[in-house]
Image (tube, helix red, strand yellow):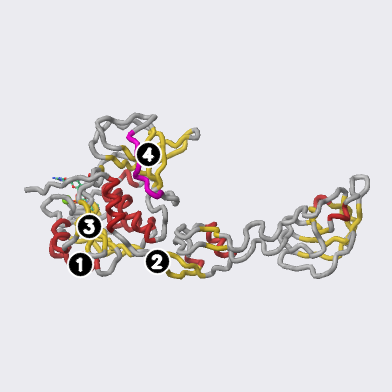
Amino acid sequence: MVEKRKPIPVEEAVQKVMEHTVVHPQTEMVSIDESYGRFLAEDLLASHDVPAFDRSPYDGFAIRAEDTNEANSEHPISFEVVGEIGAGYVFEGEVKPFQAVRIMTGAPIPTDCNAVVMLELTKEISDKKIEIKRAFKDGDNISYQGEDTKKGTVLVEKGTQINPGVVALLATFGYHQVTVAKKPVIGVIATGSELLDVDEPLAPGKIRNSNAYMIIAQIERAGGEALYVGKLDDDLEACLNATKEALSKVDMLITTGGVSVGDYDYVPAILNDLGADVLFNKVAMRPGSVTTVATVGEKAFYGLSGNPSACYVGFELFVRPIIRRSLFCTHPHLQKVTATLGVDFPKVNPFMRLVRARVSYVDGALIVSPSGVDKSGIVSSLGGADCLLLLPGGTRGYQKGMSVDVLLLESTQGSEWPWNNIVPSYR
Ligand SMILES: Nc1nc2c(c(=O)[nH]1)N[C@H]1C(S)=C(S)[C@@H](COP(=O)(O)OP(=O)(O)OC[C@H]3O[C@@H](n4cnc5c(N)ncnc54)[C@H](O)[C@@H]3O)O[C@H]1N2
Ligand code: MOO
Ligand SMILES: [Mg+2]
């Protein structure tokens, strides 16, 4: 007798995973050179004012503004040039009335000066003499200490992924070592006697193992570290041993294939033998309905489908948020946005569909269309997918022009909890 499984709604499945599986966040120090793409384990604080001193935003002359009070085009005022400074140097001398210091962008304002006149607004009579034809006010063209940011300001919050802008801030404040979240280690096992290595030629009945490489890339995109255990034939003993050994080395374990009800689908037997707590083994979604998640002691076990699209979707829904949460992210799920359906989708399904799709901007509107054929065993639609189009199950199809919810695969922003109010369709 084939085991009868009871499907649970997608949001309930995600909730169960979030409640029952934990990878405790850990931290480590890395050099700034290796920080790009990592997740901050502490708020990034401004350790000093920026700028740290009043400076010139222009190439020009630093003056005392009050000396220009009488200046106009008929009555230019002469200034004696008493020094010059480029960025990186400090003018130590005194600047008296009707004296000026030639100053370059980024150089500190001399103590006695309170305005800068751009080179273009001065007339150079000689090396030592300039004329100014208009009045300036105290503070004109001065970039003041702290106007960019003040010491103590939280500039980037813990849990943020380090992008090039964050790297600039780390460097600005002298953080040559950064405390980041340690990447959780996720084991990957591919199962199936049909699987060939990528470098092997095709043979009758065989296919290349694409899922393992896909999952490794998904783990890295989510911010984790993959430990590829290998591909195994459909052999219960071998799969069980490999699973036990892998579980001892990783924070969580993913297997692909063998989760359904077929003769060589050994994941249910393996979980039984391990005494695992199965959170669910059927989700009301397409693809990925057979996705199985269990806990073995403290560790999460993900039995993802062998079908490539189902495997892909199962990862993004159930593994990604756990990885992101272990990286201190407060928005661990894929970011949900609303888009306009670009094509008709007449096929009806009682389960929620997660269609591999692509978003584009057309005349300012976000349009979403499938990136290929919508079947669980399809691999070709994955290459062009940058989102998952959510079509809740029901008895009616969807038409072009309807508003739909979309989960963005590449957005770094994420969602806190995207699974409430997913509206079936709304114009
Ligand atoms: N009688 C039923 N049959 C099936 C059911 C069902 O409910 N009753 N569910 C179907 C659904 S839905 C899915 S999804 C698949 C799930 O299959 P498994 O997770 O058991 O995976 P396998 O049987 O091992 O393989 C399925 C398919 O995927 C290919 N595959 C496997 N591993 C890889 C890999 N690493 N890279 C690329 N492709 C892979 C494999 O060759 C098969 O074609 O079950 C349905 N059947
Ligand atoms: O789990 Mo299967 O991928 O629903 O099609
Ligand atoms: Mg199977």
Spatial CA span between label 1 and label 2: 24 Å
Spatial CA span between label 4 and label 3: 28 Å
- Above or below, 401 relative to 220: above
Q: Give the range drawn in magenta.
A: 415-424
Q: Position of residue 281 (x, y in %)?
A: 20, 51
Q: Helix or strand or loop: what does disc 3 sit on?
A: strand
Residue occupied by mark 3: 294
Residue occupied by mark 4: 405
Give the foreground label among 3 and 2.
3
Q: Which amino acid does label 3 sit on?
A: Ala
Give the left or right position of residue 383, taking residue 7 as reference. Answer: right
Give the foreground label among 1 and 3.
3
- Mark 1 surroundings: few (<14), some (14-19) or many (≥20) residues within 10 A: some
- Which is the main secondary structure of the residues drawn in magenta? loop
- The residue shown at (17%, 57%) is 267
Residue occupied by mark 2: 182
Residue 384 visible at all: no
